[in-house]
């Protein structure tokens, strides 16, 4: 089982940024409205995510770190209409098999929490503990037991860039959540609930103006913002609330907005979207691509007057 877990872990856990992605998604799925992230050495030494969500029921904690155990899917139908991020139940088991993994959680209906330590897939500690409501996960020494994978990691600077980018992707969309993000003891972002425009401005202080665009047809809805004065080639695409990547959609957007910063939100019927090309990747495929691109193009031709964001 150890070997199987390690192989499976490779699917989900590629680098510190993929760990951060899974942990942030779990916190959002738990309805947290405060998420605090700490990164050390690009995430090679530490990735910590602390939330004030509903917490894990004490009877479910051991189950949560087991492979293919998820509390989020109940029937086959759910698979096609998942509104939560998680549904495969392999993130925590994978992460805990390739790191020193510490979890502390207090469920909302309990006065006492539980803490758990797993090192390279081996149980070390499990006990009651006093804790705030919510969950904290600390992932230390990623790949300490897989030296080959560890050697494949890039420099701390590059890994930090990737983890920061993951944070930005979720913070941009979840504007009703308070976030704090620090790296090597330095606080990089402190965000309170706010409108999308001001969230963009906080995450990208160089953005001065934003142009809103929107369109809706029988396929779905597409809306977002373009910054006319910030042209760094950065752009963020979301489909039904998930950050995604799709090269040909990106090409369609770039043909309209050039190199300018943008965020674009697509709302489509779930069966238009295939998220599962690869469990850990955020690439998506669209069914009926052409009508999706049509919707996107139309929205980008429907620009409002620029507003200056403060
Ligand atoms: P998935 O998210 O696909 O269900 P994970 O391995 O990411 O699988 O998590 C396993 C389970 O642990 C989740 O289904 C959830 O019940 C629980 N869990 C994990 N993280 C949290 C959290 N931050 N708050 C509450 N529950 C959590
Ligand atoms: Mg998950």
Image (spheres, rainbow, N blue to C red):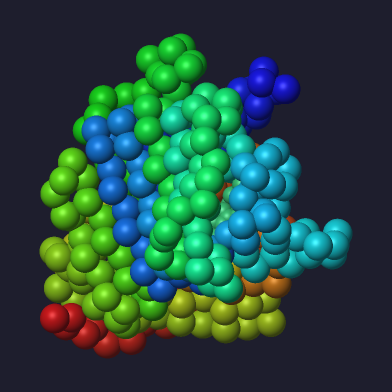
Q: How far from the left and from the top, in percent, is residue 23?
A: 47, 50
Q: How far from the left and from the top, in percent, is residue 120?
A: 52, 24
Q: As drawn, is 222 to the left or to the right of 289? A: left
| In the image, residue 177 above or below residue 10 | below
Front-most of residues 147 and 119: 119
Q: Is residue 260 visible?
A: no
Total tally of numbered discs in the picture: 0
| In the image, residue 291 above or below residue 103 | below
**Quarter placement of the C terminus:** bottom left
Q: Residue at x 37, y 63 (%)?
A: 35
Q: As drawn, is 166 to the left or to the right of 190? A: right
Q: How far from the left and from the top, in percent, is residue 221?
A: 57, 79
Q: Residue at x 31, y 31 (%)?
A: 45
Q: How far from the left and from the top, in percent, is residue 58?
A: 61, 57
Q: Residue at x 38, y 57 (%)?
A: 50
Give the quadrant of residue 196.
bottom left
Q: As drawn, is 65 to the left or to the right of 262? A: right
Q: Is residue 305 visible?
A: yes
Q: As drawn, is 152 to the left or to the right of 4? A: left
- Residue at the right extreme? 76
Front-most of residues 81 and 73: 73
**Quarter placement of the N terminus:** top right
Give the quadrant of residue 257.
bottom left
Q: Quadrant of ligand 1?
A: bottom right
Front-most of residues 45 and 277: 45
- Residue at the top extreme? 148
């Amino acid at each position: 089982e150890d070997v199987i877990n390690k192989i499976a872990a490779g699917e989900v856990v590629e680098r510190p940024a993929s760990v951060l992605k899974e942990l942030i998604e779990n916190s959002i799925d738990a309805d947290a409205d405060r998420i605090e992230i700490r990164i050390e050495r690009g995430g090679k030494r530490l990735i910590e995510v602390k939330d004030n969500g509903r917490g894990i029921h004490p009877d479910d904690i051991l189950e949560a770190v087991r492979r293919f155990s998820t509390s989020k899917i109940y029937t086959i139908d759910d698979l096609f209409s998942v509104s939560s991020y998680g549904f495969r139940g392999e993130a925590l088991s994978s992460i805990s098999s390739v790191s020193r993994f510490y979890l502390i959680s207090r469920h909302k209906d309990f006065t006492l929490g539980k803490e758990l330590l797993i090192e390279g897939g081996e149980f070390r500690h499990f006990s009651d503990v006093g804790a705030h409501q919510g969950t904290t996960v600390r992932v230390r020494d990623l790949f300490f037991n897989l030296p080959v994978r560890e050697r494949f990691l890039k420099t701390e600077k590059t890994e930090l860039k990737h983890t920061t980018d993951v944070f930005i992707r979720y913070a941009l969309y979840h504007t009703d959540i308070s976030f704090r993000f620090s790296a090597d003891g330095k606080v990089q972002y402190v965000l309170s609930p706010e409108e999308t425009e001001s969230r963009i401005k906080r995450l990208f202080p160089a953005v001065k103006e934003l142009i809103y665009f929107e369109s809706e047809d029988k396929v779905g809805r597409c809306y977002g913002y373009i910054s006319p004065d910030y042209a760094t080639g950065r752009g963020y695409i979301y489909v039904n609330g998930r950050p995604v990547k799709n090269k040909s959609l990106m090409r369609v957007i770039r043909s309209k907005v050039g190199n300018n910063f943008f965020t674009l939100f697509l709302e489509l019927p779930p069966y238009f979207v295939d998220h599962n090309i690869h469990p850990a990747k955020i690439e998506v495929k669209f069914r009926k691509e052409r009508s999706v691109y049509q919707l996107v193009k139309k929205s980008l031709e429907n620009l409002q007057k620029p507003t200056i964001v403060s």
